[in-house]
Amino acid sequence: MIVTGRMFRSVRPYVELAGLDDPVVCYQGAVVADPATGEFLRHVPIPLAVAREAIEVIEGDGFATLNCYVDDDLVVSHETSGARAYADFQHIPLREVGDLLRWLDRPPTKLVIVDEPETLDVYKPRLLDRFDGRLFIAKSLPFFLELASPEVSKGSGLAFLAARLGFTPERTVAFGDGENDFELLEWAGYGIAVENAHGELKRRADWICPGPDEEGVAAVIEAYLAARA
């Protein structure tokens, strides 16, 4: 199963390339989608009033790049170098709408602030204090601070998938590398962090496998399948 913070339209080509047909968890768990049909089986957006409040606060604090995700589209008020870098990284189009607050009239799936890692590290506690219990807030990559519904996490997305497909936490192994993977590894019966993972995730994990340069995740899966053969 693929569980990611990425947009569905961003991850879908990789799912198709891998030949996977199981639903994929996207947007930090806010969306569970069928890669064959494109249908959203689960969608938990940010309540509109909370999203508008967050946008007003973030823009008021001077952040130039705030990404808004609506209907699996990436929307910004104006294109910035940060927004363009994010869109290029995700291989997706970028839509400019001008005044984001005036344009937004329905609940967005998530919001992402793009800035320097040190700036986001300082700013994150302010948002946590302001929106405690009203938003899920975590960094996915050092330059991206992500905001979603408080009902959302990769763990909740996988739990939805487990109920739909009929597997349990006790028989689930999860791999992760970022602070947005905390809930994912906590939900799974056995949580594995890769060697280059966020320090706190490594401390919480049941085990640490080699990093991507050594194809650690693939090595673990292959070893498990070989042991069952």
Image (cartoon, helix red, strand yellow):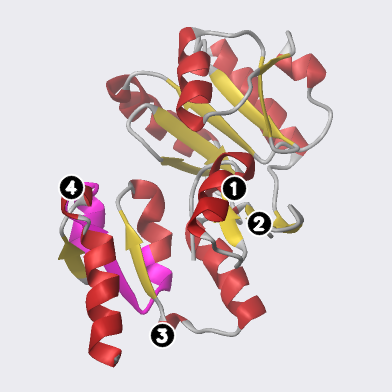
Reading the image, the residue beneath label 2 is 35
- Name the residue beneath numbered marker 1: 12
Residue at the extreme bottom of the image, as rendered? 229
Tell me what residue is drawn at x 38 percent, y 55 percent. Answer: 181
Q: Is residue 103 left or right of residue 191?
A: right
> Which residue lies under the disc numbered 4?
213
Q: Does the magenta stretch include residue 27?
A: no
Residue 53 position, x and y percent, is 67, 27
Q: If you read the primary sequence from the N terminus, does the residue marked by circle 3 or circle 4 appear first?
A: 3
Residue flagged by tag 1: what amino acid is it? Arg
- The answer to the question of whether label 1 and label 4 lie on touching residues, with beta carbons closer than 8 A, is no
**Viewer-nearest of labels 2 and 3?**
2
Relative placement, left or right, of 58 versus 36 is: left
- Identified at 30% across, 51% down, the residue is 177
Give the quadrant of residue 106: top right
Q: Do the residues labelled 2 and 1 touch (CB within 8 Å)?
A: yes
Which mark is first along the chain, 1 or 2?
1
- Give, as a three-letter code, the residue at label 3: Arg
Q: Can residue 135 be seen in this view?
A: no
Q: Distance between the residues labelled 2 and 3?
A: 24 Å
**Residue at (30, 69) in percent of width and height:** 191
On screen, 82 above or below 171? above
Q: Give the range drawn in magenta.
A: 185-205
Secondary structure of residue under mark 4: helix
